[in-house]
Structures are given as C-alpha cells and as structure tokens.
Amino acid sequence: MVTTNDNEHAEWLEKAGILSDALPYMREFAGETVVIKYGGHAMGDKSLAANFARDIVLLKQVGMNPVIVHGGGPQIGEMLDRLKIQSTFVDGLRVTDAATVDIVEMVLCGSINKQIVTAINGAGGFAVGLSGKDGNLIKARKLRRSKKDPGSNIEKILDLGFVGEPEDVNPHILKTLEESDIIPVIAPIGVGGSGETYNINADTSAGAIASALGAARLLMLTDVPGVLSDTKQLMPEITVERAKTLIQAGTISGGMIPKVETCLNAVEKGVDAAVILDGRVPHAVLLELFTPHGAGTLIR
C-alpha cells in the first residue's frame, strides 16, 4: 500500500476536485471544434510550448476537435536577417516580395510548423502539419491597402507584394480530419488564382478558418490579458455591439483593433464566441474552456 503525507493527499484531492468541476464544460464542448491561433511569447517559451502541446492533446482526448493556426513573425525576421534580406513594414504588415515570400513559406511551413507538430506528438497526440495550400484550404487574393498622403491629401495605393487575405476557405480536408484522431496544425500561407503564394496574417487566417468550420470557439492567444477597459481592467465578456462602441471611443486601440475586428467578423459569420486571452499564462486554453471565470475576454 502506498503511503502519503497530508500535504500530498490534500494536493490530490484538489486535483480531483478540479477535474470534477471541469466535467460539465467537457461535456458542453464534446464534439465541438475549437480554432486556436497560436503565436507570440507562448510559442517562443519552451515551458509554455510544452504546456500548450499537452493541453491540445487533452482537448482531443476529451472529444473536442482542436485546430491550430500558428504565426511566426519573429522567426521569419531572424531568418531574413541571417540571409541578409531586408524587409519593411507598412501598418504592421511585412512587405513581401518574391524573395521574401519564399523565406516566409520555408519558415512557416517548415521549421515552425514541424516544431509544433513534434511537440504535440511528443505529448501523446497525433498532429499533422498543413498549410493553406494543402487541399486548397485557403484560396487567397492580394491584400489591398491605401494610405492618404498628409501633404496632398491624395489616397495612395500601397503595394505590399505577396501579402494576401483569404478569399475562400475550403474546409473539406479539416472536416475529414475531424472524424479521425488527427490534430491539424496550419501555417497561414494561401494560394492565389494562378498558383502564387501569399503570406497571410495568422489572426486573419484563424478567423476565416473558424468561420468556415462553424467553430464553437475561436481562441486568440496574445501577449496581453485580453480587452481592457479605459481604467485598464480586464473585461471578461463583451458583446459585438459593445466592442464596436469601444473601438469608436478609442478604448480599444492600436494592435488590439485588428484582433478584435477578426473576432467580430468570425462571430458575425457563425462562430459561437471568440476569445482574446493571454498565451503567457500557463494552461490558458484549459482555463478558458473548462472553468467558469475563463481566462480572457469573450466576445459573443
């Protein structure tokens, strides 16, 4: 017979209680699809990356269908620096010429994608790496941006090169994988009408995929706690209408605007709810899905 001290016994009881409390949420999400945008600090930290891999395997084990869409901006920047290829940014988007898009595809579909796949498989899952090119998952078009010249007040069209946006998402391959034990890990690369490669923002890709799948949740892992009020307090839940009001008022500003707009677009296209949460918090995905208080800002 195994003997335990009082502290160990109390710890085990606490863990058993946590599992019991999570059961109603596991039942609620059983059979549902959850699209998770993975990037930022959570992907670069080894400990957080290991936790994330185990959490994704757990979601699959309890009957959910996790779909991972990952970024990789810092890693792309590092590779471009090593190869002495200069790149510039316009409104936070990397201008992607023919030389750069080859590096982007190599890094996203190669080293980053396979690191995530390997971590999930090492945690006991069965992950497979994909890109938007596979099965025509993401058909893309060139992203158009314009900017008003402050001097002449003339609207100028910006050429971002091979930066794209989803034109159509074909979920057939992902629907097929839902019926298996396979966890898809997707690099945000799209294919154009003439077969050209497009670099697509990972947030945008995740939102489009979640909409096409009719996901129960779109989880956007970021490096901030969520949407903050004007007094810098986390707002656990907001409606679509409230989010739009906060953007107009300037409470939601800067880089948070496109993330919130991605969530709004997904919710308006059929995703049950979208959540912006802090990927730097260990087990943030489990806290969001399986606890009553969640871990970020839920938009429904």
Image (cartoon, helix red, strand yellow):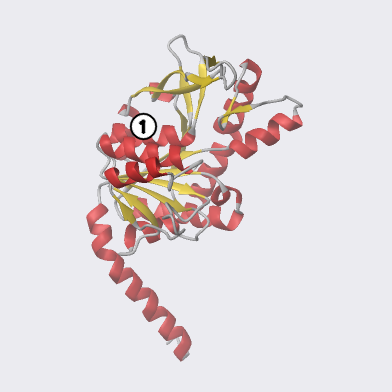
Confirm whether residue 254 shows in the render.
yes
What residue is rendered at 64% in x and 38% in y? 75
What residue is rendered at 28% in x and 48% in y? 239
Q: Quadrant of the N terminus?
A: bottom left
Describe residue 2's horizontal placement relative to residue 115 as left or right: left
Crowd around label 1: few <14 · some 14–19 · many ≥20 (10 Å): many
Q: Amino acid at mark 1?
A: Ala
Q: How many marks?
A: 1
Image quadrant in which you'd find residue 13 = bottom left
Q: Position of residue 218 (x, y in %)?
A: 35, 44
Describe residue 206's horizontal placement relative to residue 88 as left or right: left
Q: Position of residue 255 (x, y in %)?
A: 51, 41
Confirm whether residue 185 shows in the render.
no
Q: Nearer the viewer, residue 31 or 250?
A: 250
User: Is residue 267 depicted above or below 51 in this figure?
Assistant: above
Q: Position of residue 196 (x, y in %)?
A: 51, 14
Image quadrant in which you'd find residue 149 = top right
What residue is rendered at 46% in x and 31% in y? 130
Instruction: Please name the residue that numbered disc 1 is placed on.
Output: 208
Q: Position of residue 208 (x, y in %)?
A: 36, 32
